Amino acid sequence: MVDLTTKLVNVLGDKTATPLAKAFDMHVVGDLLRHYPRRYVELGKPTNMSDLRVGQHATVLARVVEAKNYSFGPGGKRTRTEVIVTDDSGARLSLTFFQQRWLQDRMKPGKMCLFSGEVGQFNGRLQLTHPDYDLFDEDGDTAASRLSRGVLPIYRATAKIPTWKLESFIALCLDSLDEVDDPLPEQVRTAHGFAGTRAALESIHRPHTMGEAVTARARFRFEEAFIVQTVFAQRRHALEDDRAAARPAVDGGLRTRFEQQLPFTLTAGQRAVVEEVGADLARTHPMHRLLQGEVGSGKTVVALMAMLQVVDAGGQAALLAPTEVLASQHFRGITALLGDLAKGGMLGGADGATRVRLLTGSMGAKARNEALLDAASGEAGIVIGTHALIQDHVQFAELGLLVVDEQHRFGVEQRAALVDRSDVTPHVLVMTATPIPRTIAMSVFGDLEVSTLRELPAGRQPIQTNVVPYAERPGWLARAWERVREEVGKGRQAYVVVSRIGDEPSESDTSSLVELHEELVHGPLHGLRVGTLHGRMSADDKDAAMNAFAAGTIDVLVATTVVEVGVDVPNATVMVVMDADRFGVSQLHQLRGRVGRGSEAGLCLLVTGAEIDSPARERLDAVASTTDGFELSKLDVELRREGDVLGARQSGVRSSLRLLSVVKDEAVIEQARAAADEIVLADPTLSHHPTLAAAVHELEHSEQADYLERT
Ligand code: ADP
Ligand code: MG
């Protein structure tokens, strides 16, 4: 017998298991059985061939009307078989096959077949060229039993492994599958009327009615939410007994003096969050708060005031930034904003002033040691750094607050690493510029309270975003470079952003950036001062480039996404994003937040070769059509989860949230959260729920955890 951990090769043999591993990263029976149908076809119901759109990858169940062979080519030696099919909607579709003369006999009029392929158009008629097909006659019995069930599953498939092959592999596994251990505790199953895993797997893959499939999907959807919520319930539970030092605001302290000397007044939203965070810090229970706010909403000032409150109360604060560029920029910005208040122990320092230190991986030994020393002695009230802060076992005299900027770049584990190191748990404030709808915040950041900055400081300029499709409109790209020249002519500056190819900065990214730079300085941007900034430059060079851009001695900065987060040069008014379709929605939204930060309106040009009507273009159009980050992040999450269904066809990519939509399934997530809380409260270590414990462990160590952190 077989269970979910049995290797696929043992059930299906090498010839099947190897392609499955390659195409879908499936290795054990569980991987295959968790590949749920993406939809179902009800036999006898119209498949709605009339809804087909050109360019779509479609699977249709259709009846053959006629099949005819035609000869063509030199000497008439080649054969084209044209098959006309129809469904109950009455629409007709023509299928074209080459060199398969025998098909004419097999595709008998009236025969039902499944066809799958790319929808094209020929002489005004929709057609599938060279589709995959399933004639239901591979084996009389199976075909009959599949047809008699009346509901056919349609799987996300590849050209080599079409949906019906997956169906047959899954059938083989299901036929020999033992009873399966269930991650859902019995009491939860009973309360919700859910079937066990084994039965539900049967129902989701081989349903007899749509109702049966829907019920099974609801169960697995709940299961996904439940496992995620169990992780968060455990985290919340673990934190309950944690004690932090209370850091109440001190009258006339640095925080107050800082606010008095600010060159602007706080927005009402900033005020409210400063109060909210201030109250949290005054408690002996550690704060775990997510501060979300649009790009440019002024999160840094809020965080700085929280840090100062902690310093006033005798503690230290650490600010963790995702990149060196951002860490140095925070260091410069915060030191400047603090002015004399940051000159503790220095000439010209204000009374009671503190010290701000920067700590990054590539700093010189001397500067590093100074920073380390000041952190350990407590001289530095504020330490700003990158991952180096975590990795280098930095000692703090008394770490009271950890601020994590741009959370989506950090994992919970890294956050935990710093928190665990201190004797007393520090308070934690996490900031993100990717606004997160409430449901997502709940499912993703289930262990955090959430504050939101909704308004931008007054006087912010709108950002106009245009898509530049160079394939259809070659002239527009030239126009884009002209716009850059015009802005520079007005004394403004521009970014040109080049996409990264993989997750890590690579040689080829650098070379494509360098190439583009060459092209621009010898072509459309001739005569302008054009600099470069990319991940492979040394920290000093990066700093120099950023500083030159900030100082205005460079007109145009050609950069990789190191400029994505937080970079603040108010004089920059245009951004050209090359191959914008390679970026995610939220990433583009963040990127364009780099322009229009000053008194002038911003312009963002999304250059793309993606075809009109393609999902990539739809994404870009969405970004161009709204500046509402909340709308976009919803869309982003939806697209990422459903990207495969929508035609991205990244068959190798697997997300563990297969059925759950963190946008649509708010009610499910809430129920799952309540159920998880109850289980964890009664059994915090899940000792009575070994299967659940294993699922939780797997989730925490999987790529999904990564996915969850990055949303
Ligand atoms: P983000 O939320 O994207 O991190 P920042 O904190 O970098 O935004 O703030 C963007 C810019 O707005 C900074 O230059 C900051 O000094 C400025 N700023 C912050 N708060 C205000 C305010 N209330 N009025 C005017 N400018 C502000
Ligand atoms: Mg920021």
Image (cartoon, grey):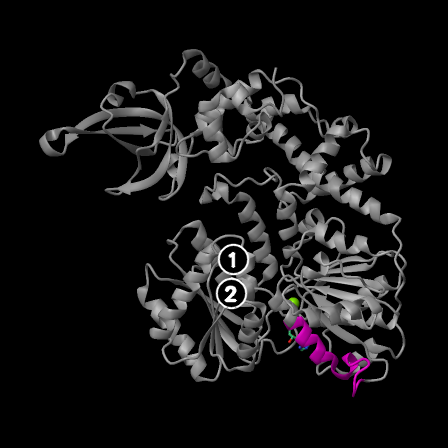
337 drawn magenta: yes
Residue placed farthest to the left in the image?
Answer: 75
Which quarter of the figure has residue 538? Answer: bottom right
**Mark 2 or mark 1, earlier in chain:** 1
Disc 2 to disc 1: CB gap under 8 Å: yes
Mark 1 residue crowding within 10 angstroms, few (<14) / some (14–19) / many (20+): some
- Residue 679, percent across and down? 81, 35
Mark 2 sits on what residue? 534
Disc 2 marks which amino acid?
Answer: His
Q: Is residue 217 visible?
A: yes
Q: Measuring 50% from the left and 20% from the top, which residue is drawn there?
A: 12
Residue placed farthest to the top in the image?
Answer: 141
SS at badge 2: loop
Q: Is residue 483 left or right of residue 421?
A: left
Q: Measuring 88% from the left and 66% from the top, which residue is drawn there?
A: 247
Is 596 drawn above or below residue 80 in the view shown? below
Q: Is residue 567 left or right of residue 477?
A: right
Magenta stretch bounds: 329-349
Which quarter of the figure has residue 377? Answer: bottom right
Mark 1 sits on what residue? 505
Q: Is residue 86 left or right of residue 21?
A: left
Q: Is residue 668 visible?
A: no
- Residue 497, percent across and down? 47, 65
Q: Measuring 70% from the left and 24% from the top, which residue is drawn there?
A: 181
